[in-house]
Image (cartoon, grey):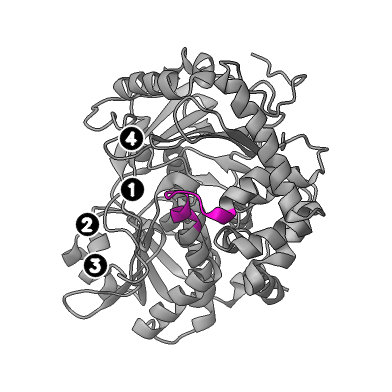
Amino acid sequence: MRDALLQCAFSQGGTVIASSILTAPARAFSRTPFDIIDFSEGTMRRIAIIGSGQAGLLTAHALLKAGYQVTLYSDRTPEQWLHESKPTGSATRFDLSLQFEYELGLKSWENDAPWGDGTHMTLCPVPGNRMLTLAGRLRRPFLAIDLRMQSHAWMHELTERGGNVVIESVTVDRLEQIAAENDLTVVATGKSDLTQLFERDPVRSVYDKPQRHLAMVCVKGPVMGFDGIPMLPIKHNVIGPVGEGFWIPYFHKDVGQSWNLVFEARPGGPMDRFGGLKDGESVLEVAKQVVKEFVPWDYKWLKDAELSDKHGWQVGRVTPTVRKPVGRLPSGRLVTPVGDTAMALDPIAGQGANNGNKMVRNLVECIIAHGDRAFDAEWMTTTFEKFYARHGHMTYTFNNMLLEAPTAATKDFLFAQYGSDARFDNNSGAQLLANAFVENANDPALLTPYLQDRRKMHQFIEKTTGRPWLRAVASGAMSVALEEFRQWRGLEPRHPLVHEYKVAA
């Protein structure tokens, strides 16, 4: 079953799966397009994991369940994670990633966290011009969990289940000792110094510097939703030459249901004003200024927001990078990466945690299948290449596409989907297109090939809407033009909303 679905996903850009997703009711499916891992096939080989973030802990839990002797090395205690650390990202996870966590019994917050339903995007080619909107529903909902709370809980659960946790900051010299004591050593330390053990892949890594300057802040106070948008969405605002802003429903370690705000500023642009800030209150103050100036339609919603906790913020930048999967220590011993250590992604498409989860699943599958044989450089390379063909390439491509100007195929798509409003009972062609765009965040192999190829996109539009592509695109473009004319006259645009939908304060 898995192989057949994977073949569909990659043949002709995923036509079969994409079409089924477009017509499927939201939340109707419970299986991933992968076989459940047979954890009974593991052996008692010793495996060390360096790092206690999302990818490292997931790897440890999966291998422990498979019967391996697992030791996890963390540079902080669970309590330090919970009380003294900054969140390393929003860690938004879509269905494919969540199902793997649930398979491992890691689902402590599913009854309390805010389940997100999709994405609402406002596209502004220049500041002040709300040219069009997209409102798409996922087939199944997403979650964004505070990683500090998650690492705290997952570390305790690992020890309760029989895993070993060692608290120490691992250097290269110490890594030599660890690698000598274990059959396999996996490095999952994100963007730490140990990342330099893994050579940058110059062919796959298309950037040599960050494409956005980033800020993130956890806030409480804003209501959980937006009037006129009949779902709990990621609110995605694209401000052409300025950057992007994302408001993500979030489950915070202290305040529970709340929001995680992410700002993606184009370097040197007018939103690029977070660098050098030293505390969360300052980040939130600048965030409110940015929203008031560039996203004024959301300012009333945000203006009274408060910082969720004093550590709940980050500023920084990421160079999107793919690294080679074999790290060679000075002694010649080998280690392999997983998660952000192997692939660093800008957070613009919310793919970091999802890519990491899929990479972990692939790694564990390959470890189990390898039996008692040596984990040599050939195995490490083959394992990563299997993942990259299955998920990594399309994820990296889709993520980077959002950092660039839209392709011609993407522009046609955005016009054709105009009219989407995210009503649960909206089965129009425009809505099905919008849903497909949002579902691509769950599995970037579904729509990304079409976004790269205008001819394929036209075929996709026709198949999805049941209309000639030119008519679908022209109809949407005409509606957009009418709203552009309203704005030119100084009036508010009348983009699709469900006006009877109101969010309780």
Query: Which residue does the numbered mark 2 point to in the structure image?
Result: 193
Report the residue at 72% width, 63% height from top.
17
**In terms of sequence position, does the residue under pointer 3 or pointer 1 come before the other?**
3
Residue 314: numbered disc: 4
Q: CA distance from mark 3 to mark 1?
A: 24 Å
In front here: 188 or 173? 188
Query: Answer yes or no: do the residues labelled 2 and 3 have beta carbons within 8 Å?
Result: no
Image x and y of residue 107, in percent: 60, 46
Vertical order, 117 against 56 (above or below): above
Specify few, some or many for label 1: CA neighbours under 10 Å numbering under 14, 14-19, or 20 or more. Answer: some
Q: Is residue 152 left or right of residue 41?
A: left
Specify few, some or many for label 2: CA neighbours under 10 Å numbering under 14, 14-19, or 20 or more. Answer: few
Image x and y of residue 478, in percent: 69, 37
Query: Which residue does the numbered mark 3 point to in the structure image?
Result: 197
Query: Answer yes or no: do the residues labelled 1 and 4 have beta carbons within 8 Å?
Result: no
Q: CA distance from mark 2 to mark 3?
A: 8 Å
Q: CA distance from mark 3 to mark 4?
A: 25 Å
Specify few, some or many for label 3: CA neighbours under 10 Å numbering under 14, 14-19, or 20 or more. Answer: many
Query: Answer yes or no: do the residues labelled 1 and 2 have beta carbons within 8 Å?
Result: no
Q: Using the rendered view, name the quadrant where residue 308 is placed.
A: top left
Q: Is residue 162 visible?
A: no
Report the residue at 72% width, 55% height from top.
461
Q: Which mark is in front, 1 or 2?
A: 1
Q: CA distance from mark 4 to mark 2?
A: 19 Å
As shown in the figure, which amino acid type bears the numbered disc 3? Leu
Image x and y of residue 426, in percent: 81, 39
